[in-house]
Amino acid sequence: MLSEVSNSFWGFFKSDSKERSFRKSVEQIIGEKPGNPLLYQLAFRHTSASKETNIGGFRESNERLEYLGDSVLGMIVAEYLFKKYPFKDEGFLTEIRSRIVNRESLNVLARKIGLERLIEFDGQRVAHNRTSMYGDAMEALIGAIYLDKGFRFTKKFILKKLIANYFDLDTVIQTNTNYKSILLSWSQQEGKRVTFEIIQENGKHHHKEFVAQVSVDGEAVSKGGGWNKKKAEQEAARRACEALEIKS
Amino acid sequence: MLSEVSNSFWGFFKSDSKERSFRKSVEQIIGEKPGNPLLYQLAFRHTSASKETNIGGFRESNERLEYLGDSVLGMIVAEYLFKKYPFKDEGFLTEIRSRIVNRESLNVLARKIGLERLIEFDGQRVAHNRTSMYGDAMEALIGAIYLDKGFRFTKKFILKKLIANYFDLDTVIQTNTNYKSILLSWSQQEGKRVTFEIIQENGKHHHKEFVAQVSVDGEAVSKGGGWNKKKAEQEAARRACEALEIKS
């Protein structure tokens, strides 16, 4: 009887064994049995594999969960850094947070914890080694965990399973990947002309924010902000590397 | 004896009665006695009134709390909208959130809940009706509440005291302040030439993001992003209005 109920519930999945193995995988990643496995299914459904719903034109994919997870992750990392560095200013905290939660870093993290094999996508519509699909799924997973298990569990997951295992904060702080030089050496190889320009300054005094723009052969490629010109250029260079798919 | 302890603890404040009245004000705003009033003091200390600490050059102001509060507010509003609009996509959720938590909206909110009279600033260093001081203090207050009272209390504070009291979501969604037209009518009054330009397109397909730039008399004033050209222009126009201090 119980198994019948469970069967009809799980009829959503293609097969019982597939479903069991999915639940097992999620459990291995988050460290506890999933309460609502459907949430995790959704977290791993890339938009290329989105499903039409009954609600006029609304297609279900992991994008909403990604939006939620992004904000949960950002907040928990913000608090963590706030408490870890009581005498560092908000510029430092913002910078270190962005090094932890940027798309590239989340892409790497997602592969490290094994999300790769769980993601559902349409291979014909995605060149899957070239997208932010993994990082997006990482954020969506955090959104799913938050809805399924609540704030405390999610905080523990992020701090113990992600940050403690995969980030050495001292290294994060010291390792200042020099995207500007990566970009410039790429430009020499490819025979392109790369230019940097500060195109905006917002705020006054120590509230100042700069925006730098990177152009390749005269065409704007990316922009990035920072609390000094150097940071802004680095951020713009990082985004240019991302946009142009330049590997470091 | 107790009062001695309490006196020495409160010696930090200029006077007992001033301190009592401060605690009362905080209690009125947050709906519960503050556990650690010093946190709230810090939340209301604008950077112009920042105090030097014993730790080499580090000046204490509300900026760190603002960083924390910003992320807490963003997350709680994200979850609220996520649950309230189950069939809206992340573009909609992001847009509505930014209408609620943008600097201008927080400035108004801060005045409405009475933060104005609590903020400590150096009037000679701030033209206080022209800054984002109130919105910053609003965020810093949220950071202080979070540290003092924890996640659940802060969530209730944001949803019941702020969102429910001061935002009519239907109106927020419908009221699409047309910053572009505000900017254009200003330009006619002032005899300036305002131009809009899409200077960047990121991503592909429905992940696209556009960046628009506003120039006044040929000089770039602001940029804004959005998931379509119109949104990007509106956001750029909103920031231009902010930067040029144009009132609607």
Image (cartoon, coloured by chain):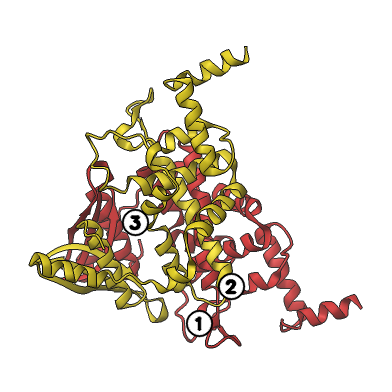
Chain colours: A red, B yellow
Q: In the rendered image, is residue A37 in sight?
A: yes
| Distance of label 3 from label 1 (alpha carbons) | 37 Å
Towards the viewer: A50 or B159? B159
Question: Can you identify the residue that label 2 sits on?
Answer: A44
Structural crowding at the residue carrying mark 2, measured as other residues with C-alpha within 10 Å and reported as few (<14), some (14–19) or many (≥20): many
Mark 3 Cα-neighbour bin, 10 Å: few <14, some 14–19, many ≥20? some
Q: Is A237 situated above or below A22?
A: above
Dot 2 falls on a residue whose secondary structure is loop
User: Percent position (x, y) of residue B74?
Assistant: 47, 57
Is B210 left or right of B93, judged from the image as shown? left
Q: Which residue is depicted at the point 38% across and 71% down?
A: B175
* Picture layout, residue B191 above or below residue B12: below
Residue at the extreme right = A1
The crowd level at tag 1 (other Cα within 10 Å; few <14, some 14-19, many 20+) is some
Which of the chains bears the disc numbered 2? Answer: A
Q: Secondary structure at mark 3?
A: helix
Does label 1 lie on the same chain as label 3? no
